[in-house]
């Protein structure tokens, strides 16, 4: 019997496709997410919008909170560690969380090295702004990639930028001649074998989800139509005026992302979405997406 | 031949890839609406999260159409992981999933543990006309506790039952679509339509 194989890790990411992963900070919120039809919850101490507001060093959540959330629901539970903080990851693996997010939303612990994710039996998801970054993370063992977007803003513009960038870079690699791939790998700063995989398959070797600023069913449908295979919603649900309805509507929107009739029906009367932030008004040092490389 | 994959959530892509690898000239329809089932000659319930699928089936009124396809039209049906959960009985009912209970099997969700206990191992497959060994990939898999008279065990992890056949349904707690040595299962599935 083999556990923690790459196939079991990436296979698990495949099972999460067509779903919504919701940020939660309490067992009660986790239950609301599960009842709405979330495929997983991300256990946190604060949602990204509050991390942004309160400042200070953002770290892995208290294991007590994570364990209480794991007890409350039967769907998978994910949790975040700081970039490069493999000791936090060891703790989360020991707790039994189902997926670890090595996340730019928390304050990075290492400005040079990401975690070697092959060292773990639990799968990892990592953020990316472009194809090179995505393939570097996969090269380190990530089983799932998500766009970084700009977390905690309720503004989908950065997630759109990152998803479009990755998709257009994939298309370009597919069209290149084989003798051009090494130079492209050098330009992207990505492992050659993975560039070759993209050239041959026209996709990343692991699923590709959207995250960072998704706040409405329409945002979720937009990301799915742009090529995302699932959606992470951070602050968007529990910072809206009616989290229960918003959560259900976003789940429905991801399943029926290509059906405007359904989208129009489920988008009605949801109350107020989270207020949100104009990303262009953020200062360079307030951006989360530039953390990690 | 038109093949329907229930596509509310889960690993639809891998099922499509696996079935197309096994058989050429088939048309795959992603089923999200009752009318998507029209003309389908075979049905697949993929893996994923059964609570999510169950809620979407309810919210979008798909239960009757799916049941009709399986129990009246009797199209060959493959259910894997979350798929077998949707068709069986749960040992403990909890409202998170409302299974169809058409399969004479009782199971517990996530019966092997959380993701870090997910595993692969050799599975012995024993159909009435053919036997073989396949790779079983189990991801937060359900665990079969009881098999009733109407279902026949066909897949075994050592002595433990991990798959059954009942009339036109093949139901497995593991993922044949994640391995490439599972042709024997697809052969049997297509033979049910002959």
Image: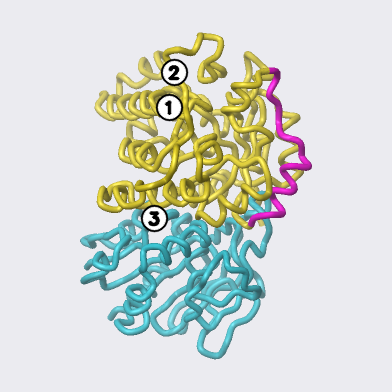
The hue used for chain B is cyan
Seen from this angle, which residue lies furthest top?
A: A284
Q: Residue at x 68, y 24 (%)?
A: A58
Residue B122 occupies which quadrant of the picture?
bottom right
Query: Closer to us: mark 3 or mark 1?
Result: 1
Q: Residue at x 45, y 12 (%)?
A: A281
**Residue numbers of the magenta segment:** A56-73
User: Residue A141 location in percent, x, y?
Assistant: 57, 33
Residue B167 occupies which quadrant of the picture?
bottom left
> A178 or A235, which is in the foreground?
A235
Q: Chain of mark 1?
A: A
Q: Is residue A63 magenta?
A: yes
Whole-angstrom CA distance, mark 2 to mark 1, is: 7 Å
For label 1, the SS is loop
Question: In which quadrant of the rendered image does the N terminus of chain B lie?
Answer: bottom left
Question: In which quadrant of the rendered image does the C terminus of chain B lie?
Answer: bottom left
Q: Chain of mark 3?
A: B
The residue that label 3 is drawn on is B12
Q: Chain of mark 2?
A: A
For the question of whether residue B143 can be seen, the reply is no
The residue that label 1 is drawn on is A155
Seen from this angle, which residue lies furthest right?
A: A64
For the question of whether residue B81 can be seen, the reply is yes
Whole-angstrom CA distance, mark 3 to mark 1, is: 30 Å
- Indicate left or right for A95 with B9 as reference: right
User: Residue A63 location in percent, x, y?
Assistant: 77, 40
Res. A266 mark? none
The residue that label 2 is drawn on is A279
Q: CB of mark 2 within 8 Å of CB of mark 1?
A: yes
> B83 or A38, which is in the foreground?
A38
Whole-angstrom CA distance, mark 3 to mark 2, is: 35 Å
Q: Residue at x 63, y 54 (%)?
A: B118
């Amino acid at each position: 019997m083999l556990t923690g194989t790459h196939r079991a890790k990436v296979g698990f990411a495949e099972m999460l496709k067509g779903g919504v992963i919701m940020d939660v900070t309490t067992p009660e919120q986790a239950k609301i997410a599960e009842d709405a039809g979330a495929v997983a919850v991300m256990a946190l101490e604060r949602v990204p919008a509050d991390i942004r507001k309160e400042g200070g060093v953002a770290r892995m959540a208290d294991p007590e909170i994570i364990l209480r959330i794991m007890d409350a629901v039967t769907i998978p539970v994910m949790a975040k560690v700081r970039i490069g903080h493999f000791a936090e990851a060891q703790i989360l693996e020991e707790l039994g969380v189902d997926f670890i997010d090595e996340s730019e939303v928390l304050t990075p612990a290492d400005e040079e090295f990401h975690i070697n994710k092959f060292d773990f039996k639990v799968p990892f998801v990592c953020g990316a702004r472009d194809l090179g970054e995505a393939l570097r993370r996969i090269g380190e063992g990530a089983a799932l990639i998500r766009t970084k977007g700009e977390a905690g803003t309720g503004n989908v513009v950065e997630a759109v930028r990152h998803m479009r960038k990755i998709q257009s870079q994939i298309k370009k690699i597919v069209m290149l001649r084989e003798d051009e791939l090494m130079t492209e790998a050098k330009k992207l700063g990505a492992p050659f074998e993975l560039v070759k995989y993209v050239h041959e398959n026209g996709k990343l070797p692991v699923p590709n989800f959207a995250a960072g600023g998704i706040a409405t069913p329409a945002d979720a449908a937009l990301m799915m139509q742009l090529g995302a295979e699932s959606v992470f919603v951070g602050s968007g649900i529990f910072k809206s005026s009616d989290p229960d309805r918003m959560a259900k509507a976003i789940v429905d929107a991801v399943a029926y992302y290509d059906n405007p009739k359904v989208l129009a029906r489920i988008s009605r009367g949801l109350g107020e979405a989270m207020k949100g932030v104009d990303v262009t008004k953020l200062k360079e040092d307030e951006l989360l997406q530039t953390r990690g490389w | 031949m038109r093949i329907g994959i229930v596509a509310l959530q889960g690993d639809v892509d891998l099922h499509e890839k696996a079935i197309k690898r096994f058989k050429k000239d088939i048309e795959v329809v992603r089923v999200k609406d009752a009318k998507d089932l029209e003309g389908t000659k075979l049905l697949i319930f993929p893996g994923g999260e059964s609570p999510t699928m169950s809620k979407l089936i309810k919210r979008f009124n798909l239960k009757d159409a799916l049941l009709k396809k399986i129990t009246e039209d009797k199209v060959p049906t493959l259910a894997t992981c979350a798929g077998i959960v949707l068709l069986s009985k749960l040992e403990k009912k909890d409202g998170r999933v409302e299974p169809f209970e058409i399969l004479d099997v009782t199971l517990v969700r996530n019966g092997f543990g959380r993701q870090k206990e997910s595993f692969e191992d050799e599975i012995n497959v024993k159909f009435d006309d053919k036997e073989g060994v396949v790779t079983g990939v189990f991801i937060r898999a359900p665990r079969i506790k009881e098999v009733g008279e109407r279902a026949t065990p066909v897949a075994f992890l050592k002595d433990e039952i991990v798959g059954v056949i009942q009339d036109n349904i093949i139901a497995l707690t593991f993922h044949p679509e994640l391995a490439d040595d599972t042709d024997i299962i697809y052969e049997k599935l297509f033979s049910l339509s002959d």
